[in-house]
Structure formats: structure tokens, C-alpha cells
Amino acid sequence: MIKVGIVGGTGYTGVELLRLLAQHPHVSVEAITSRSEAGVKVCDMYPNLRGHYDTLAFSEPDAKALGAMDAVFFATPHGVAHALAGELLDNGTRVIDLSADFRLRDANEWSQWYDQPHGAPELLQEAVYGLPEMHREEIKSARLIAVPGCYPTAVQLGYLPLLEAGLIDPSQLIADCKSGVTGAGRGAKVASLLAEASESMKAYGASGHRHLPEIRQGLGDMQSNPVGLTFVPHLTPMIRGIHATLYSSLIAEPGDLQTLFEQRYANEPFVDVMPAGSHPETRSVKGNNTCRLAVHRPGNGNTVVVLSVIDNLVKGASGQAIQNLNLMFGFEENMGLSAPALMP
Amino acid sequence: MIKVGIVGGTGYTGVELLRLLAQHPHVSVEAITSRSEAGVKVCDMYPNLRGHYDTLAFSEPDAKALGAMDAVFFATPHGVAHALAGELLDNGTRVIDLSADFRLRDANEWSQWYDQPHGAPELLQEAVYGLPEMHREEIKSARLIAVPGCYPTAVQLGYLPLLEAGLIDPSQLIADCKSGVTGAGRGAKVASLLAEASESMKAYGASGHRHLPEIRQGLGDMQSNPVGLTFVPHLTPMIRGIHATLYSSLIAEPGDLQTLFEQRYANEPFVDVMPAGSHPETRSVKGNNTCRLAVHRPGNGNTVVVLSVIDNLVKGASGQAIQNLNLMFGFEENMGLSAPALMP
Amino acid sequence: MIKVGIVGGTGYTGVELLRLLAQHPHVSVEAITSRSEAGVKVCDMYPNLRGHYDTLAFSEPDAKALGAMDAVFFATPHGVAHALAGELLDNGTRVIDLSADFRLRDANEWSQWYDQPHGAPELLQEAVYGLPEMHREEIKSARLIAVPGCYPTAVQLGYLPLLEAGLIDPSQLIADCKSGVTGAGRGAKVASLLAEASESMKAYGASGHRHLPEIRQGLGDMQSNPVGLTFVPHLTPMIRGIHATLYSSLIAEPGDLQTLFEQRYANEPFVDVMPAGSHPETRSVKGNNTCRLAVHRPGNGNTVVVLSVIDNLVKGASGQAIQNLNLMFGFEENMGLSAPALMP
Amino acid sequence: MIKVGIVGGTGYTGVELLRLLAQHPHVSVEAITSRSEAGVKVCDMYPNLRGHYDTLAFSEPDAKALGAMDAVFFATPHGVAHALAGELLDNGTRVIDLSADFRLRDANEWSQWYDQPHGAPELLQEAVYGLPEMHREEIKSARLIAVPGCYPTAVQLGYLPLLEAGLIDPSQLIADCKSGVTGAGRGAKVASLLAEASESMKAYGASGHRHLPEIRQGLGDMQSNPVGLTFVPHLTPMIRGIHATLYSSLIAEPGDLQTLFEQRYANEPFVDVMPAGSHPETRSVKGNNTCRLAVHRPGNGNTVVVLSVIDNLVKGASGQAIQNLNLMFGFEENMGLSAPALMP
């Protein structure tokens, strides 16, 4: 049994960590911090946790208490992990950061997109990008994990087989992505009200979104040519789920794309290549850590369309964080993550 | 490891049994029947089951194959269990019926509400009504279980402490109930389309619903006076969940109602009495077998209001069926049912 | 053409007034105030109004400018109309208040429920409660209208025929009400987020809600005995709509309830008695000023159940306000209110 | 006052015609046909029409009765208008067909996509494609109108300014489209149930959809080069609305795209170019005949992204049909179509 802490546990990724870890046989959540809710029991805030965490309460962040943990998750806005990660690592505590703090390798690029200096550039060297399908071996020995963003996870897993095989033009990629509203977090914003966001669909950030450089970096790691990506996210009237529709142009004779995808992911526990001709639904991964994929080539033409769905709070955040923890501590990779999706 | 079969597995209670049993360490689903889908793999119909039941396929109902099981669930329309249960019981297979076939003790009353003769009156004597909070001991030794309906579960658990304590007038009960649309089943009906049922609320069956005699019978078992119940169900624009708002009139000085409820359910693993003043949300039990309750006495007056929420597919059907199976086979009562609700 | 102003126009009742008045041939909206949004064009905040109000902008509240109007609507939180109504009336401007400021005739009772002194008790004498089905003649000559609340409108119209006819016991009324989330206003609250409020149902205010005294007063005006009412509102996962399910006990032989309702409302342009056996849907009045009713007597017993649906923003607020304005200024009662509901 | 009939009035485009025409001062709906519902009053099927069409009932299709109309709308599955249009035209009745029967100019291409012979190729010559922004003058004098499909309307209006100006490569177009569920019609299909389609997002028809040839033909009419289009529609959990996200590559220096769009649509009553940087929401056109557009050039690069939203039942079907009727009969183009969208 290992001891873990969660920093910033009041948001959706925090409660989702608690939900999933309640089913993990080798993890005990010993601390969860929140300045605003210090003293409140987690089950008073999230009644679904009644009977599962009846005594755990939010506490003030305390580096010493966190340093007594085997691992600490950061479920915080950007900037917080910068300030605390170094001290925890020095204490021998492993850090799994769900925020954007260590996702970009280039501190300057980070500063541009987040409008502030990078707070811990000295840690960038050792941070491992926690996409197991790309970096499983580095993750196993990592001390500091940057858990990928939700859109980047769905997009990278969709393009990965095509880019590794050199079949598509990396300079002409289009990722049209649709996300449920939990992607916008638990903040009280008018635009996220049921009265505003349901019965409607809209794009946002069409001229630039913070996940763009992260995706570009990841796609760049899959092959050696410059990446040109147009990324348009959309707000969809549902609670959970991301649907990425990925367009690309063939630059080589592709052979059988279905086989390519099936072989690339044959041993991946959390990537499911659907049968040829399928259209995966986001609800098929609701509450679950799987990414489901389908690949199409309309009219047998030059364009390849990949459909990629995940639960933004699970494979897109807290589930993937636990998958990383399992790899880091030598547990079965699917420990705590084995329940089927909730459908209907 | 026990072997179980499911008759009529294409509906929502069927897939929900599969979802929950995938997490049960001592149960193996060996057969699932469907005339219309015979030959189809369950994971082709329900992609959330991919990776969990990769070979299980629907088969034609076959009494012999089913008779080789330790237990068989009926997730069928009414009438089907009547025809098959007797033979299975004779073979030593226990029967857990999620339909209405054995819920009413009086075959004539059953006939009236279901417009056909009762098909197995000889089994009524031994059928046990599978509400563990009322009949746990009989369930343990039962061979044939009638799993309660969804509305009856929410309503009975809400009134139980009050009626047992003789505090309210059983002749003047009003149960105003709101259900998600899965309560109407997976049939393709215009009224259940998203375009018809979302962004709207309506009552139905205001002049009489088949759950009424079942609830009346259950409430009658809690005390000795005649029951008068007005029951109005409503269709609510959500997938899962029942919210029962239960009104009754005090006939005795009640003392502390909060304490009464907490004590009555102190040892119940699947009934959660919320703190005084609470308003339970159906989402707090989404995918979960808990019934959450709160009791109010507005203005300290003569009316008691109980708020009772369940997931209609779990505590209102498949979860409760597994809870019964656990009791019948001596497993921990919460086996396969321990995951927290999905929230948000 | 009359000139009207709207005080506090950024909330849902404000934009709904604008939407409906865009179709009114005899009304010109000349001013709309908002401290927080002064200077912003209404169509920049509400793009559905582009092409309808291309120049109208929010302005600072200014009693002089408002005093130049023929009528002013208050779409404000409580307390604001108290402060401004008197001066406007002195200027000859008629006031139609959508807030709670003048709904209760008893200033002390108002103070108790709203936790502050009543700010204009001298105006209570002349304020008319703007439920046309009860007070049409007074409305025609009124200078100050208190537009009924949303729940009170649905509940009063449902009980009205029964109470006027002396058929039910006014001391034992139960109103179980379900509202869409716009009833909670446009404030940015976590509980109103799509991620929190959709896919769920919950009660609130079970121990006391500010609409209770208003309903009690209204029901008291329909007959001469004391009113005992249990009122439980519920938050429903939809944008618009109220469904009131109204329970009462017969104290006299009722005759034909269907006929009673049809006759009572035969000449009412905005009350629609559905055929016997109906279950009105809230979507049948989406965007529309109608209240649809159905009356049931389950099992021909002692309990009468009335189902009453309105759009909380139309008949429950802005539409009813315009209906009042039409009566006050001698326009056809349905002017600007004649479009059918949006369905599906 | 002109007399109109509706063939096939039980679907969503039929009831939407009735809803909109209820507000049209110069149109009287004299007949509405449905084989399955003959004899049923329209307001019994659609309670939102109570008080608006209290006597109109569905009748058996009857060419003679329809021939007495000034105009007939076909709100039918494909093939029906083929059979009846010719006779009506011979009688002097104008035909406005909301189905796909006359949208493709090439009868052979029609046959391929609809798997049956074209039933009225002799009428193709005179059929006018009813997109007023492209063909207003022909519409005015037309006898037979093919109302554009929902996706084709949103896509064509988005690409029109760019293609007419020769700024983008017509051979590399990608239209990623999201539709509410009414786009799938009122048929009782499992996939359209609230329990299946809400809380989820999925693509469909990724390998080929019947709207593809229609869009291709329309885009071809805007310029002289061959069109290459990838079109992927998605099912979105909302009732109404289409959001088209349109990608294209610049082939010429574009100048100011915002100005280009504003000028192209300056005189169009039903196309609204939003301010630069906007992201139109589908709810901003709910129930309304407007197409709202925004144009983006992410990172000032080579890709242009157009966001285009319509209500699929209004500008995507019934509203556009009425817009055509207004043009054909010399009414104001926005007659019956002037109400603002319902928001929230």
C-alpha cells in the first residue's frame, strides 16, 4: 500500500482521482489540499464519496505533510506545481502533475502561452510526458510526470500510427475536437451554466488554444518533419467526453489502415481500435480510461479521417495519471481502472 | 466462482447486469439469451463491454443450458419468467427475476394489472420479495427472488422508518416520483426520442400505474393498517435516476426524525441517510447501488417530506438483483457493487 | 406606440422581455438599464437580438430618463423596485414589477421572508397582483403591477377552479413543483453549471421557499378558509419550464371536474385545459405564454391531481408582464404573445 | 391570402412549417396530408399548435384537393414529390419540395445515392435550387423549388464568399459538421433515444453521406474548378442546430476576410456575419431563420476556418422553404420569419 496526496482537490480532476482511487487496492489517499475548503470533508462536497472517504478532509497545502507521501498528484491550475514539485522530489516523493506546468519542454514557449515566466525550468530535463503509448519505459523510472492534456491525448493517439508509419503529411493536419463541459473546469462561469451551454454547440479558441503547442510537440516526436496543425475545439452539451475528428492527407500508399492501427495498438491496454467502418461514441468510454479509435478513408481518396474518443476526466486526466502511477510503482497497469464504462 | 445466465439480455437491465458483474470476482456469466439478437456478440451491441466480454454472444433461450447455471437472472418483459422459472428451479438453479412476474403475492391482482392470467401461481408461495432492507433473512435461503421495481424501491425505503414506527397515516400517502428515461426501456418509441423527451417534463400514468399495487403491498407489510397511496410518476430529461418525493401526515409525536432514519438504516450497506436539511441529488448515485434519503418536516408542521433517490438501473434493478445474489450465495453483500457513483 | 424602459435588463427575464417585445407592434423599448453592463449593446450580450435591437445599449439607471417612459418593467432582484417605483408613479409612468417587491400585501411578512425592511409599504395599497385570470379588471386600471412569481402562477392557476368551487380542503394542499434551471437566474453559481445540474434531479428549499407565502396569499383570495400548503420545488435538468403537480382532497361531491375546468377557463386566452386524461408537457409551452392544465382523479378516489405547466420565463415572468401591459394600455391581450411554442 | 397545402405533415419539418406559418399574415394552411394519421387533428399530435390550428386535421393525400392550392410543400421522404409534383404543376400549383427529390441536377447521380431510379427527370430542368443567397432571382419566377438540405445550407453559405472571390483551393475542402438529433427525423429509432443519444457525441456516415453530392454541386456553382470535399457529420446531444466548421487553404492573398464576408452578405436578410473573432452558438438561431457566420485565420496562416450555424429545422428546412415562398409570391422576404431566436 502506497500513500498518496492530492494537491488542489476541489476541481473535477481531483474528485475523479478520488473516485478512481477508491477502487485501487494498493493506494491510500492520505492527504488532499485546498486553501478554500480546508476543514471540509470531501464527502460533504462530493456526496458520491460518502461511504468511501468518510473521514478524509481538505487541508491547507503543507509541503512537509505532502513530503511524507510516496506520490503526490497535482490537480491544480498552472503554476502551482512549479512552486512545489522541486521540494517534493528532493524529499523522494514522486510527482504526477495533471496541470500544464511540465508538458512543454521549452520554457520560453511555455511562458508565451501562459503569460508568465516558467517557475521551474530546472526540472524540465527530467520531466517525462506521461503518454504511456509513447513513453512507457521512461515513465516506469520517472520521478516527475507531466500528464498530457485531454485534447492532446485524444489527438496524439489518433495520429500516432499514421505519423510513425510516415503515411501522412505532418504539415497539413486538422484536428476538429468536441469536448464536454467538464473540460472547462468547475469554475462558476456564466458560459458554463446549463441554461447557456445546453441545447447549443459552439467553437472556441479558434485562433489559438493552449493545447496547440503541446499537441504540436507530441506529433513532432512521432516523426522528424515540421508539424502544421489547425486545432479547433468546440464546447458540446454533455458532461464528459472528447470526440476528436482528425483529418490528414496521405503522402504514401497506405496499405490497410485498419491493420496498421490494430497492430500498433495490439498490446495497449487502454487503446481500442474499433472494427472497420465504426463510429465510436464518447459514451462508450464514460467513466473509463479507454481511448477508442476508428480510421476511415472516405471514397478511398487522399484524405484519412480518424475518429478518437476519450473521457476527458479519465484518459484525458485522472485515469491517465493513475495509469502513470501504476507504471511508476510496478502495479498492474490497469489497477483501479478496470471497470467498464457507464452505458447507457 | 458461480455460473450465471441472463435471459433477455438486450435491454438496459441486461447490459447493466453485465457491466456490474464484470467487476464481481466470484461470478462468471456463461450464457445470455435473446431471440432477436442470437449470434451477436454482446460487445458488438454494447461497446463499453469491449475488453470485458469479448467472446460472450447472445444465444437462443435454451432451458437445458440455463439449467446448468447456478443462478439465472430474468431481464425480460413480464410473462417470460412465468414460463421458465419452474423448470429452472426444479433443476436446482436459483432464479432472480427482475420483471414483475412474482412481485405481487395475489395472482388475481397480478392478472388485473397485467391483462393476462398469471402463468405460475404455484410459485408465488415461495417467491421472496427481494428488498434486502425488509427481507434479508428470507432472501438468504430463497430459491426464487422477485426483484422490486424501481419506483417501489425508492418509495418503500423512504416510507419504511416512518411506517414501522407508526408515525404517519398510511391511508393518506402521496408519492410524487421523477424518473430518467431508461425507466421506459430500450424500445424504440417516439416519446422516448431525445428530440421529444429532452428539454421537457411530464407526468404519465396519473390515473394508475403498474407499480402502484406493488408499492401498496410493500407498505402494507410494514404495518397493519390499510394503505391509501396516490402515486404519480413523471418522465424527467435525464438518462438514469429516480427521485421520489414522499408526503405523509403525522399521527403521533415523532421525536427526532433524523435519528429515527439513521438508526433504522445504521447497518444497511446500501441506504445512506443524509445529514439533516439535505436534498439528495440523483447524480450522487449514478451507476451505484445506494439509496440516499433525507427527511424534512416543513415549518415543523404536520407533514413529513422524505426525499429518496436511487439509480433506477442499479438499486432499482440490476444492482439490487446482484445484492440479492450475493445474499443467496453467501458473498459479501456489496461484492461487485462497491464503486462510487460517477459524479460529475 | 408606447415607450417602455426595462430596469435590470441583463438577466433572463430582461432578455425575454426584449425577445417578446420585438414582436409587439405598439411598444418601443427606449431604455434598458444595467450598472454592470452600461455601454454594452444588448445584441452584443444576446446575439439572438442581432437584427432586432442593433442600437439599444444598457445604460446607468436614471430616474429622469425612466420617468419619460409610458411604462417601466423591473427585471431586478428584490429591493430595487421599492426604491424607484414611487418616483416613477409620481411622474405618471406605470410600473410593472417582475420582482417580489409588491407581491405580498403584508409588509411584515415580506420583511420576514426577505430579511430586510419593506422599502415602500405606502405603495402596497395600490399595487395590483398581476394574475389576469384572477384580477383582470383591477389590472386594467392599475398603475403598479406585481407580476406573480413563476411557481405561484403555475400553482394558483391549477388550484383556482377547485378552490373557487369549494370542492377541496384548502388546509391540506401539496404542490410538488419542478423547474428548469433558468428559474435560478443567470448568476454564475457552481450548482447551476451544466456539469452539475444536468443528468440529475433534486429538491431544494424543502423546509421553506420565498414563493410559499405568495402562493398561500393567492390561494387564500380564492376562498375564505385558512390555507395549509406544503410546497416542494425541484431543480430539473432543462432550460425552461415549470411542471406543478398539485394534490388535494375532495370535501364535496365534485361532479365533472373536466367540465369545471373547461368552463372556468373558457374565456381565458392563456389557459388551456387539455382533454380528459392528458398529461401536459412543459415543452408544449416553450417560449409561449400559455398555462396548460389537466385534471385527474386517480381511481375515482378522494384525491384530485392537477397537472399545470408553464414556461417560467414567459407566463411565469416576462410574458405575463406583457399580458399585464396589454391590459393596462388597452391593447389586445395577446399582442406580442401569439407565437406558438417551439416544439420540438 | 394564399392557400397552401403540406404533404407529409407528421414529421419535424411538417410541424415546423405549421409553427412558422401560424405567424404568416398572408398564408392559410388549408390541407395537410398523412396516410398514417388521417383524421387526427394536428393539434392533438402537436399540443403547441392548440389554439392555432384547432380544426385542421391530417387527410389522405389527394391530388385534386392539393391542386386547388396556390402552393404545396412536400415535407416527405424522398420519392414522394417525384410522384406528385408534375400533376400539381400542371394544375398551376407551385411546388416547394423540402425533400431531396430535385436537389441534384443529374438524375443518374441522384439514382446512385438514393438507390432507385429518379421518378421525374423531366422536371429537373425547371427545378430551382432554393438557396436565396445564390439564386434569388430564379426563385422569384420558379414553379418548382428544391429546398436545400440542412448541412448543405450551412456549408454553402460558409464557403460562398471565399469561393466566389477565388481565394481558396476548392479541391481541398473539409466540412466538419455537427447536428442536433432532429436532423435524423421523427422516426422511432433506438439510436435516437434520449437514453442513447444524450451525454454522447459521435460521427456517422464518415465514408459517404447523401448530402455530399448536393454540397459538391452547390460549391461547384460558385466557381469553375472541380470540388474536392471531405464531409463528416456528427450527431450532437441537442434537439436543434447545425454547427459547420469549414476548413480551406488559401490560394491567394486574401485581404481582409471580415470585410469580404460583410460585403458579400450586406443585403442578405438571413445571413449575419458576426464581429471578427466571434464564435457563433447554435442556440443564437434556435427557432430562427438566420445563418450566423464567423471567419477565422488561425495564426495568420494558410488555413481559413469558417464557423457557420443554423437551426436545421428553420434555415435548414421549413424556414428556408417559407423564405422561398415569400420570394415566389412577392411577399416581404422575412414574412412569418421575423421572431428572434429563443435564447436561453
Image (tube, coloured by chain):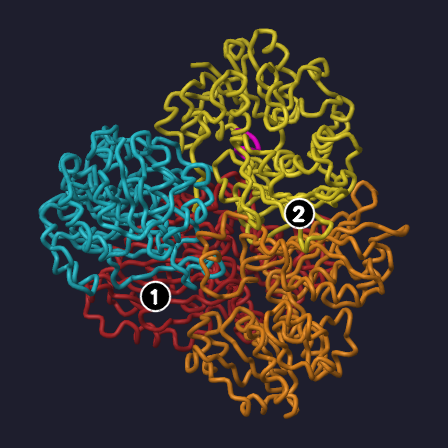
Chain colours: A yellow, B cyan, C red, D orange
| D211 and B176: which is toward the camera | D211
Q: Quadrant of residue A91?
A: top right
Whether residue A160 appears in this view of the structure is yes
At 46% from the left and 42% from the top, the residue drawn is B48
Residue depicted at x 72% and y 28%: A221
Q: Which amino acid, by three-letter code, is at mark 1?
A: Leu
Judging depth in this view, the residue of A103 and C257 nearest the camera is: A103
Type of residue at label 2?
Val
Position in image of residue A306 (x %, y %): 64, 44
Task: Give coordinates of residue D278: x percent, y percent.
Answer: 73, 49
Q: Is residue A316 magenta?
A: yes
- Residue B99, compared with residue C303, is above or below; it is above
**Residue D42 forms part of the magenta stretch:** no
Point out the image quarter for the N terminus of chain A: top left
**Residue wearing tag 2:** A305
- Position of B37 relative to D91 (above/below): above
Q: Find out whether the residues at labels 1 and 2 contact each other: C-beta distance under 8 Å.
A: no
Q: Chain of mark 1?
A: C
Residue D27 percent across, percent down from the top left: 61, 82
Secondary-structure class at tag 2? strand
For residue D308, the mark is: none
Q: Residues within 10 Å of mark 2 (few under 14, many from 20)?
A: many
**Secondary structure state at the residue bearing disc 1:** helix
Across and down, in percent, residue B122 comes to 9, 53
Are marks 1 and 2 in one subunit?
no
Majority SS type along the magenta span: helix
Q: Which residue is mark 1?
A: C160
Residue that appears at 36% across and 33% down: B23
In the rendered structure, the answer to whether residue D204 lies left or right of residue A167 reads left
Question: Mark 1 and mark 2: span between their CA atoms?
Answer: 60 Å
Residue stretch rendered in magenta on the structure: A313-318
Chain of the residue displaying label 2: A
